[in-house]
């Protein structure tokens, strides 16, 4: 079985593309959702967050995402510390999940795939690309937030052009080109490569 990464900048439409792959019977691991679940589960990850950020990080046993976000955004050192705690746990969880899959290939969807070195255990990476203006417009509509805060979040991600150069496949999700035919083309290629592996 092939292990495939799926990544793209904020607002690129990674989750939309991932759902198209799911309709084709391909299992998808959503790294952000998994990280949230892991951060709330009792265990070493939760203990490390409390040890490094304080008991205030949790309210009634659940992660206070707004409080923790306020601590790390605007502080590259604290953000790097949080990522150094969360990313290894998520990467290990994704690897264990991949080992349980039986499809010809499975996908790990993650915004910070390259930034976390999560790509190193994968066979191929699919990038989802969209122009910056389109991405900002989507996130403003989705998160009901302003452009400045979106740009701040974008600054914490790898440059879009650099990210796409590192990908083996690129799906353009600009609202003009149709996504489904692009996904089908990548899907057929991956099925062939999985059969040859």
Image (tube, grey):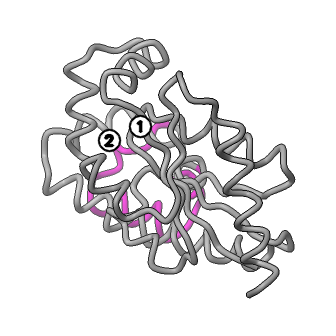
Find numbered disc 1 in the image and state the secondary structure of the residue it sits on: helix
- Closer to the camera in the image, 27 or 92: 27
Taking the view exactly as shown, the residue that stands out farthest to the bottom is 197
Which residue is the site of mark 2?
68
- Closer to the camera in the image, 188 or 134: 188
Q: How many marks?
A: 2
192 is within the stretch colored magenta: no
- Closer to the camera in the image, 40 or 24: 24
Classify residue 89 as left or right of residue 178.
Answer: left
Quadrant of the snapshot with the C terminus: bottom right
Q: CA distance from mark 1 to mark 2?
A: 5 Å
47 is within the stretch colored magenta: yes
Q: Main secondary structure of the magenta part?
A: helix
Q: Residue at x 33, y 56 (%)?
A: 163
Quadrant of the snapshot with the N terminus: bottom right
Q: Residue at x 77, y 60 (%)?
A: 188
Q: Residue at x 74, y 80 (%)?
A: 99
The x, y position of residue 170, in whole percent, is 50, 52
Say few, some or many: other residues with alpha carbon within 10 Å of mark 2 (under 14 / 14 to 19 / 20 or more). Answer: some
Quadrant of the rendered image containing residue 85: bottom left
Is label 1 in contact with label 2 (beta carbons under 8 Å)?
yes
Q: Residue at x 78, y 58 (%)?
A: 27
- Extent of the magenta region: 37-59
The x, y position of residue 65, in whole percent, is 41, 37
Which residue is the site of mark 1?
65
Residue 165 sits above or below residue 15 on the image: below
Classify residue 65 as left or right of residue 34.
Answer: left
Say few, some or many: other residues with alpha carbon within 10 Å of mark 1 (under 14 / 14 to 19 / 20 or more). Answer: few
Classify residue 55 as left or right of residue 100.
Answer: left
């Amino acid at each position: 079985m092939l292990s495939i990464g799926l990544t793209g900048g904020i607002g690129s439409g990674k989750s939309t593309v991932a759902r198209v792959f799911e309709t084709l019977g391909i299992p998808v691991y959503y790294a952000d959702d998994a990280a949230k679940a892991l951060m709330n589960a009792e265990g070493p990850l939760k203990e490390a967050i409390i040890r490094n950020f304080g008991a205030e990080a949790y309210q009634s046993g659940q992660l206070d995402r707004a409080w923790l976000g306020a601590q790390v955004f605007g502080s590259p050192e604290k953000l790097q510390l949080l990522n150094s705690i969360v990313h290894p746990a998520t990467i290990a969880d994704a690897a264990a999940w991949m080992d349980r899959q039986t499809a010809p290939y499975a996908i790990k969807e993650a915004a910070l795939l390259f930034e976390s070195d999560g790509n190193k255990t994968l066979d191929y990476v699919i990038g989802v690309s969209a122009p910056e203006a389109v991405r900002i417009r989507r996130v403003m509509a989705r998160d009901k937030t302003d452009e400045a805060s979106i740009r701040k979040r974008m600054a914490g991600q790898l440059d879009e052009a650099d990210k796409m150069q590192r990908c083996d496949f690129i799906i353009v999700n600009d609202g003009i080109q149709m996504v489904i035919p692009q996904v089908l083309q990548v899907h057929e290629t991956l099925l062939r490569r999985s059969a040859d592996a």
